[in-house]
Amino acid sequence: MKFARYIAKRIIQNKDNQNAISRPIIKIGIIGISLGVAVMIITISVITGFQIQITNKITTFNTHLQINDYDIHQSLEPNPLSLDSTILKLVKKNDLVKHIQGFATKNGILKTKQENEGVILKGVTKDYDWSYLKPYIIDGNVIDLNDSITSKDIFISKTLADKLNLKLNQKILLYFITKKKLTDTTFSQNQFITYEPRVRDFYIKGIFNTGLVDIDKNLVFVDIKQIQKLNYWDKNQVAGYEVYLHSFDKLEEAKEDINNIIGYNYLVLTVKEIQSAIFSWLDMINVNAEIIITLMVLVAAINMISALLILMLERTNLIGIIKALGANNKQVRKIFFHVSVSLLTKGLLYGNVIGVGLCLIQHYFKVATLNPITYYIEYVPIHLSIVTIILINLGTILTCLLMMFLPTLILNKITPIKAIRFS
């Protein structure tokens, strides 16, 4: 084995012939492996970062699961529902559930002296979990809520504030069309629906910016009691319940558990079903990553094969002499196995340094920026995982070493007499 290592070291260093053609080939092979590994690390880190960042943003506003009234005509002003307190306790006790909260939505028109803008009010309760939204606050704070007083605070997006020239603590007016059921005693207690315009004044408590255009352009947060009063609902009635989970990976399992608890009279939707277009896009990115990684591994393996073939052809005379001295094909293969390991080691080392280094630069300095209108975020996100990096290196090593046996098959056809004559 020491003899094989010694010969392999001589071949790699090529001290016998400084002008040998294999010298640049070896360098090209190492560069190819380095670039392949670096590209794979960057690709996985960027795609994983995209998925984590966008998923976190989406679940901030849609949560992991939603419980709604089972109505085929779902809208932004759905039918009210009120789950029994016993059922709510059972949902909260589920091991997969982190938090559950009621909410309500209503269409409105935000009116200023210069412009009008359609908005979607999201009414929230005092137990609403603001921790998911606080990273996106750019001015002011979240609205203050309590059971006794109906808050007039409103929490709006930077997009709306800029478009309508709104400032913190400014008073604004919101107009609504409210649906009201009336009973006509004249005609046998028949009910009929009337629509009435209503207006409410609010004070801007805080401004947020998520980078999600569809959300920032019209979503505002208010006290849920405002919507309950506008819709003539009871204080326990809500449009639905939002359920946060401990793990995003348990969506389907949690959905099934909650369905078993509340029964099938209500509709339970996952965030993937609510925002199917965005998650389909994320799945498509996964496919692109698989294609890139496959190509990079093949490039690294082909570079390895090319380098070994050139080395073998250049060292045909040496192979013949070693065989003439009594070495068999297996022993000669060991020499080129050590050559392969040396090339791989250098390629992996440089590739990891380049890939991880570029990822760290992007993570801390945000060099590469994006258009948030298209990509939902302002810069290329990075998520480095030690496990992923190890798997990339192991996959590259296994693939390249398996492919290494293809060029060594030529060793079986090299005989000492022909090899010495070839020199």
Image: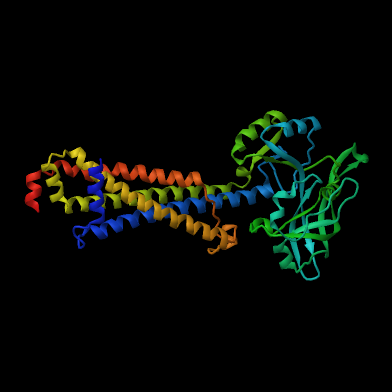
| Residue 304 at x, y percent in the picture | 29, 50
285 lies left or right of 419: right
Note whether residue 394 is visible. yes
* Side of 21 where 59 appears, left or right: right
Q: Quadrant of the C terminus?
A: bottom left
Q: Nearer the viewer, residue 159 or 354?
A: 354
Is residue 40 shown above or below 267? below
Up-down relation of residue 343 to residue 324 (above or below): below
Write down the quadrant of residue 410 in the picture: top left
Q: Residue at x 33, y 55 (%)?
A: 30
Residue nearest the viewer, comparing 266 with 397: 397
Q: Give the image quarter of residue 322.
A: top left
Residue at the image position 72 percent from the left and 67 percent from the top: 162
Vertical position of residue 162 compared to residue 253: above or below: below
- Residue 406 visible to the viewer: no
Farthest bottom residue? Answer: 114
* Labels in figure, total: 0
Identify the residue at image location x=60%, y=52%: 53
In the displayed image of the protein, which residue is found farthest to the right? 186
| Residue at the image point whose x is 62% and y is 39% from the top | 247
Q: Quadrant of the N terminus?
A: top left
